[in-house]
Structures are given as C-alpha cells and as structure tokens.
C-alpha cells in the first residue's frame, strides 16, 4: 500500500474490529492497526451517502463491497440500499474520476450490471480463483 494511502473500513459490529486487532490480527497481517487504516463503526451505506454529498474531500479512489450477500435477481432494482439504482448512483458520486466500485457477489446478475452501466460505469464481471457459484466480482470503473 502506498505510504500516503488512506483506507476507511466500515463495520457494523465493533466485535469484528476487536477480533481483527486481537486474535485475528495474524490473519490480516495487523491491517487495522496500520495508521493509514481508519475503522468506522457504522453503516457503509451511510458512509457512501456522506461521501457522495461531499465536495471532493470525502471522495474515494475505490469502494469495495464484500458483504454476506451480493446483488442477485431479487434485488430491488431501485431501492436496495447497496445494489439498487439509487445506491449505485451514490457510489458513483462518492468516487473520484476513474474510481473503482468493486462488488463481491454469488453469481452473475445482468440487472445489476445494467444498472452500473446506466449510472456511468464501465463494467467487467470476473470469477476469481476456480470460480463457481460462490465467487464473482463486479468491477465497475467510473467513466
């Protein structure tokens, strides 16, 4: 990581952060103790919303969502707080030019990809590793 980089992590459960500073720190190579890492106990949806309202100061080069459930065909196309069209527009607004919005998912979702394109992203769909039903990544780059 660049020495001037800043990483913001949103976590709803403070216990997860405690684990990463304690018994899980070897697994993360002590990442949350790095002075460039800021852990916010709170909702990533609100963090993205706040950054999208900010005039450049709060913008990001990348937003990465790796949650327990990714986008899928039952996602509310407009109002899902993470994968709906309104949320995608907020993510777009929270990114610097040419910023990346990366989203882990269980499988391909054409609707989600279409919403990303309509919001002004160029989009790639990747299956890292061996792939399969449980590993998919949507890589969206702000145009």
Image: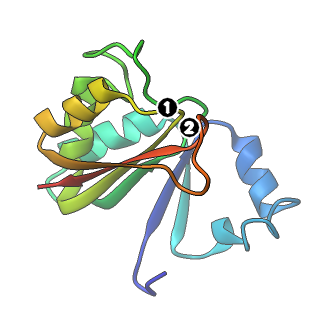
In percent of width and height, residue 72 lies at 44, 22
Q: Could you say which disc has been placed on residue 133 in the image? A: none
Q: Is residue 48 left or right of residue 57?
A: right
Percent of width and height locating residue 97 = 14, 62
Q: Place residue 27 in its image quadrant.
A: bottom right
Q: Position of residue 26 (x, y in %)?
A: 82, 70
Say whether marks 2 and 1 touch (CB < 8 Å).
Answer: yes
Residue 7 horizontal side relative to residue 35, left or right:
left
Q: In this rendered view, identify the residue nearer to me: 100 or 54.
A: 100
* 22 vs 46: above or below: below
Which numbered marker is on residue 67?
Answer: 2
Task: Tell me the quarter of the picture where residue 59 sits.
Answer: bottom left
Q: In this rendering, does residue 15 appear at all?
A: yes
Viewer-proximal residue among 48 and 89: 89
Mark linked to residue 70: 1
Mark 2 is surrounded, within 10 Å at the Cα level, by few (under 14), some (14 to 19) or many (20 or more) other residues, namely few
Residue at the farthest right position: 23
Camera-nearest label, 2 or 1:
1
> Residue at 53% across / 55% down in the picture?
128
Dot 1: element = loop
């Amino acid at each position: 990581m660049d020495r001037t980089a800043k990483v913001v992590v949103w976590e709803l459960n403070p216990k997860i952060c405690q684990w990463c500073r304690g018994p899980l720190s070897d697994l993360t190579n002590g990442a949350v103790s790095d002075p460039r890492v800021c852990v916010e106990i709170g909702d990533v949806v609100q963090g993205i919303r706040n950054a999208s309202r900010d005039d450049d100061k709060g913008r990001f080069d990348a937003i990465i969502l790796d949650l327990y459930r990714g986008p899928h065909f039952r996602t509310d196309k407009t109002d899902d707080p993470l994968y709906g069209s309104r949320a995608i527009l907020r993510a777009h607004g929270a990114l610097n030019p040419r910023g990346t919005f990366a989203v882990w998912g269980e499988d391909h979702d054409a609707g989600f990809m279409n919403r990303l394109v309509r919001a002004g992203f160029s989009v790639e769909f990747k299956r890292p590793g061996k792939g399969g039903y449980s590993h998919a990544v949507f890589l969206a780059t702000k145009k």
